[in-house]
Amino acid sequence: MDCYLSIIATTRNDNHGGDLLRRTSAFVNNVFEQSKKFGVSVELILVEWNPPIDKPLLKDVLPKPGKDVPVVLKYVVVSNEIHNTYNNASTIPLYQMIAKNVGIRRAVGEFILCTNIDILFSNQCFEFFAKRELEKGKYYRSNRCDIPKDVMEIDSIQGQLDYAEKNIIQRLGKTKGHEALHLPKFATFSSKLAFLLNFSILKLWKATHRGKFPHFTIDFNACGDFTLMSKSDWEDIQGYPELDMYSIHIDSMGVWAANALGKKQVILPKAACIYHIYHEDGWESDDPIKTIKFLANKPSLDYSIVFRGGMTLVEKKKSWDLNEEDWGMKNRELDEFVFNSFED
């Protein structure tokens, strides 16, 4: 199969966030349905990191691609033994960005999208993929719209998408053509006035900050849920920095590196969004006390240092250079399981 797009996500069968298998099944089925509907050849890579020894592997419990579905489903398993070589293995059960690097190094698609397992792709998003207009030297960002977990009670994919469109809790991300605007009312609708205001703000800022990088135009919001670029561009930035830390803000480091090396940001139209199935867990909890407790025993980055480092990268036009040459465990033999039923 001529693979245009590789989609990479990582997880483990530990019920993180509750209903993990249901959310992941919804994600996988959405990719199957959308790829078939819009005729997009997809390699879907799920990197199963540190699988719990008392639970089945995900390959044994998640859906497989049916006949005529143009998806190659690949599982790559990073064992408990490998996981336990990390210093913080006991408090961080899954190294999200290192796992995504594992997928990046093994992907065969011309373009690679790094995302997460609780995402549903809108029709407009896959319609954008189907145009096959992605370009090297650019990275693509999509708005993330949070939706209630009740969406999983709906059986049909189109029914889920109809529900999602009508039940958006919040929208994260910038709007194409309005990147310099910070007010949500301006950032979430299209108008000539907003476009002109954005243009004027950016022109004035550049005139008063000559030679400075307009960092505020870059869309870092929920970038771990959707960052898309060519495989060669991912290799150019060396994927995500492989730090023995919790993943917060490491996704932003990938976007910083892309900008530093001259990759141009492209924000998808508002309708071409992704829907995030809300779950009460992790650092995004609405309860700040829960968030503090969640992060208390996990070494993690403060964004201020990421920002300072990112601005330095842009100034020097270089990547982070934190990874070893074999980042993504390129030279390590890992268990892989491939399901390719559409050719049967």
Image: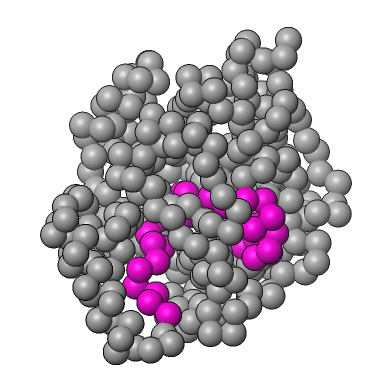
The image quadrant of residue 330 is: bottom right
The answer to if 188 sits in the magenta stretch is no
User: Which residue range is magenta in the image?
Assistant: 213-240
Residue at the spot x=66%, y=23% of the render?
60
**Which of 54/334 is in front?**
334
Q: What x and y, as percent, mark residue 181?
A: 23, 66
Q: What x and y, as percent, mark residue 174?
A: 31, 57
Q: How many marks?
A: 0
Q: What x and y, as percent, mark residue 271?
A: 30, 39
Residue at the spot x=39%, y=62% of the render?
219
Q: On screen, 98 above or below 302?
A: above
Residue at the spot x=38%, y=77% of the render?
214
The image quadrant of residue 326 is: bottom right
Does the rendering let one see residue 237?
yes
**Which of 278/110 is in front?**
110
- Coloration of the structure image: one colour
Q: On screen, 317 above or below 211?
A: above
Locate the C terminus by quadrant: top right
The answer to if 222 sits in the magenta stretch is yes
Residue at the spot x=43%, y=43% of the render?
17
Does the rendering let one see residue 294?
no
**Which of 62/162 is in front?**
162
Q: What x and y, as percent, mark residue 3?
A: 67, 33
Locate the N terminus by quadrant: top right
